[in-house]
Image: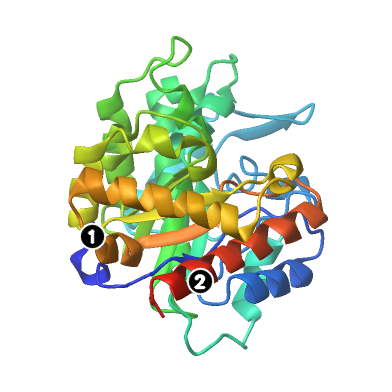
Amino acid sequence: MKQEVLNIKFSCLPTGIGSLPFKNEKKACDFIFTHCPEIPFWPQLPKRDPKESMYEMFTEHLPGIVQRRKQLFLDSNQTEAQELFYIQFINNPQKELAISQDYAAGLHRLLCHNGYRQDIQAIKGQITGPISFGLQINDETGKPILYNDLLLDIVLKNIKAIIRWQEKVLSNICQETIIFIDEPYMSMIGSTIVNIDPAKIQRMMNELIADCKGKIGVHCCANTDWSILLNTDIDVLSFDAYEYADNLLIYREELARFLRKGGVIAWGLIPTASEQLARETTETLFEKFDTLLAQLEEGTGLSQTRILESSLISPACGLGAREVSTTIQAFSLNKQLSEKIQKKYSLR
């Protein structure tokens, strides 16, 4: 956690996770500027092109990546390509890797925008993390690359280089950047299906975070052992607060330490399923947040003000697979909830 970026007061501003269902990058960016003007994020658009899916999107520089029958795998036999990849990092340990427009049209559209508000607080990017990528992408034998140390190291270098590049280009828009490492498969840690030492997860996360200039968060939209993430160097913990807040609040001591050292909680209070959205209003979600806030205040011993200033409001997960109408409803609620919280607690 980087001391020079800990003094930002996010004060429950609204932002998003990343993926949206739009097929046009201009419409997606205009939507973001309307609903998350103070902390905009670049949109992943998997319905525009499969290259923008969360696993394929960050593979264009990976040596040995192969697509066969619409399935991606990483071929460990392509040793020459792997050696060339490593040489790049030997020659330049701070190497950056760009995401091209073919793989991230929304990001490049966002970078071209010149009408940002004067009160923009930060700008957000995202990338798929090593646990989820490592469990979803196999090697040529069908084994998840999470269990292949060489391929996993290549993936870690690839992720870190893309984070560096995102920080650089996004900082041209706003000095304060936030990059979320998306880890939906953290929910499998501790199960009989996934065998990995939690300490290894923490080492990987800290390796990715080391030397980053902006804030780095982890987003997990399911339940997990939250102590693993809270005891890393991450700056932001983003989670599905609609479904799993009670699970997170069990970790009182870890949350207290995390917040005291400047950590931020991104409360994913807005459900992303249409049937859940139909049951909720700004008022019902505010009541839920108000209850959670009181529980966190009591459990950590931190002041209400400290917690509120260290909070963001977001949907529970990305909406790339949802309908546009559902997405509009979710982000409208997200903004309205943020405004209600700020008004209620005199944050702005």
Residue 101 higher or lower than 126, as above or below: below
Identified by mark 2, the residue type is Ile
- Locate residue 322, reporting x and y percent: 76, 46
Under tag 1, what secondary structure?
A: loop
Residue 56 higher or lower than 45, as above or below: above
Is residue 75 among what the camera can see? no
Q: Residues within 10 Å of mark 2 (few under 14, many from 20)?
A: many
Is residue 330 among what the camera can see? yes
Residue 40 higher or lower than 188, as above or below: below
Q: CA distance from mark 2 to mark 1?
A: 18 Å
- Locate residue 30, reporting x and y percent: 71, 75
Residue in the picture at 39% in, 14% down: 195
The residue closer to the viewer here, 184 or 251, is 251
Identified by mark 1, the residue type is Gly
Residue 312 shown left or right of residue 63 in the figure: left
Residue in the picture at 44% in, 58% down: 179
The residue closer to the viewer here, 32 or 197, is 32
Circle 1 residue: 262
The residue closer to the viewer here, 33 or 313, is 313
The quarter of the rendered structure image containing the C terminus is: bottom left
Under tag 2, what secondary structure?
A: loop
Q: Residues within 10 Å of mark 1 (few under 14, many from 20)?
A: some
Return the disc, 2 or 1, that comes first in the chain's sequence. Answer: 2
Circle 2 residue: 39
The label shown at residue 238 is: none
The quarter of the rendered structure image containing the N terminus is: bottom left
Give the colour scheme of this rendering. Answer: rainbow
